[in-house]
Amino acid sequence: MSATSQTDKLVRMANQIAAFFRSYPEEEAVAGIHKHLVAFWTPRMRDRLAEYAPQAGARLDPLVVAAIASTSDDPGPIRPATYDPHLLGAGASDAG
């Protein structure tokens, strides 16, 4: 999959999340989108979307742009060993 099609997929998914939160007050919507991205997206996915946001224009929902700009030190529930190959075997799986 090319980088462009991966970015397109991330934009589509982020806009779907924004559509879910559209009926919330703006502050709650932005916070909800941010929490969702932190909880369910890998840092690489979030970084790719953040890199694309300045050039996205109307393709990216303004709520998503605001959520990306939100700052948080919370790494989310995804264990670093899941997305960092240097930590392979350091608890990436909860199996057995």
Image: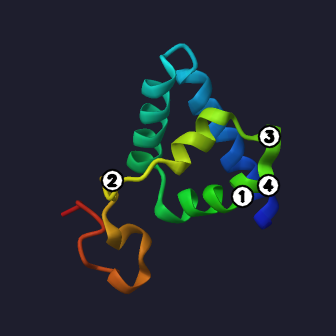
Residue 52: image tag: 1
Label 3 and label 2: CA atoms lie apart by: 26 Å
**Is the residue 7 above or below the residue 89 in the image?**
above
Mark 3 vs mark 2: which is more N-terminal? 3
**Front tag of 3 and 4:** 4
- Identify the amino acid type marked 2: Gly
- Identify the amino acid type marked 1: Tyr
**Front tag of 2 and 4:** 4
Mark 2 vs mark 4: which is more N-terminal? 4
Label 3, on which residue? 59
Hey, which residue is sitting farthest bottom in the picture? Answer: 86
- Identify the amino acid type marked 3: Arg
Q: How does the figure colour the protein chain or chains?
A: rainbow
Give residue 30's position: percent from left, percent from top: 49, 33
Q: Classify 10 Å Cα crowding around label 4: few (below 14), some (14-19), many (20 and above).
A: few
Answer yes or no: do the residues labelled 4 and 1 have beta carbons within 8 Å?
yes
**In the image: residue 54, left or right of residue 48:** right
**Secondary structure category for the residue under label 4:** helix
Q: Classify 10 Å Cα crowding around label 1: few (below 14), some (14-19), many (20 and above).
A: some
Where does the N terminus fall, quadrant-wise?
Answer: bottom right
Residue 76: image tag: 2
Label 4 and label 1: CA atoms lie apart by: 6 Å
Mark 3 vs mark 1: which is more N-terminal? 1
Label 3 and label 1: CA atoms lie apart by: 10 Å
- Identify the amino acid type marked 4: Gln
Give residue 92's position: percent from left, percent from top: 30, 68
Residue 19 visible? The answer is yes
Label 4, on which residue? 55
**Secondary structure category for the residue under label 1:** helix
